[in-house]
Amino acid sequence: MPPSNKAKLPSAWDRFLEELDGLLREQVHVHCIGGFVVSLFYGLPRPTADVDYFAVLPYASVDELQALAGAGSRLARKYKLYFQHVPTISLPEDYETRLTEMYPGRFRNLHLYAPDPYDLILSKLERNSPKDRDDVAYLARTRRLSPEVLRKRYTRELRAYLANETRHDLTLKLWLDIGFEGPPIKP
């Protein structure tokens, strides 16, 4: 069950993204990941100050996006929020087919996309920080995710691309044990 795309942005984020949108010279499509998506799209009540993103279309827009809204930019200093390109993260091979635009129609040139919750979970697999484990548990319970779907997507679309399959197999098992136990959490 996807979240509502009509979610209201917190005012600082709304102003930051609105100003960035006005500065962009063309349509920019940003594939977001991380805490920004978990918090602002899936509803985890945890503050975040950055938009981690994996891909941008057109790709040449990465430099413009970083210059306008990356760490240390004028917008970042003004709003204490910023964009951060994370090009080395691993996502399932068909993740693009499952992206959802986060705020459709809200901005003229800026289009932010969120991966579905399974893909978002798998994007955190390699890092496996305590915060990532908390995100997994939150997403699994609030989105009523299926452990079988997560396991299949990992096996069919991601595992073969990871450097240390054994390590990531164990991480996935841990996440299934801690994230998919207990009653669902109400979002």
Image (cartoon, grey):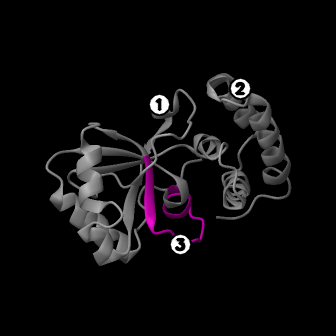
Q: What residue sits 24% from the left and 70% below the top?
A: 74
Whole-percent x and y of residue 100? 44, 44
- For marks 2 and 3, the one nearer the N-term is 3
- At label 3, the amino acid type is Pro
**Is residue 47 visible from the viewing direction of this image?**
yes
Most distant residue in the left direction:
25
Q: Which residues are magenta?
A: 37-53
Asked whether, in this view, residue 16 is left or right of residue 143, the answer is: left
**Is residue 105 visible from the viewing direction of this image?**
no
Residue 47's tag is 3
The quadrant where residue 46 appears: bottom right
The quadrant where residue 133 appears: bottom right
Q: What residue sits 71% from the left and 51% below the top?
A: 140
Asked whether, in this view, residue 183 is left or right of residue 108, the answer is: right
Q: Secondary structure at mark 3?
A: loop
Mark 1 surroundings within 10 Å by alpha-carbon count, few (fewer than 14), some (14 through 19), many (20 or more):
few
- At label 2, the amino acid type is Thr
Whole-percent x and y of residue 122? 64, 41
Residue 155's tag is 2
- For marks 2 and 1, the one nearer the N-term is 1
Q: Are marks 2 and 3 in contact (CB under 8 Å)?
A: no
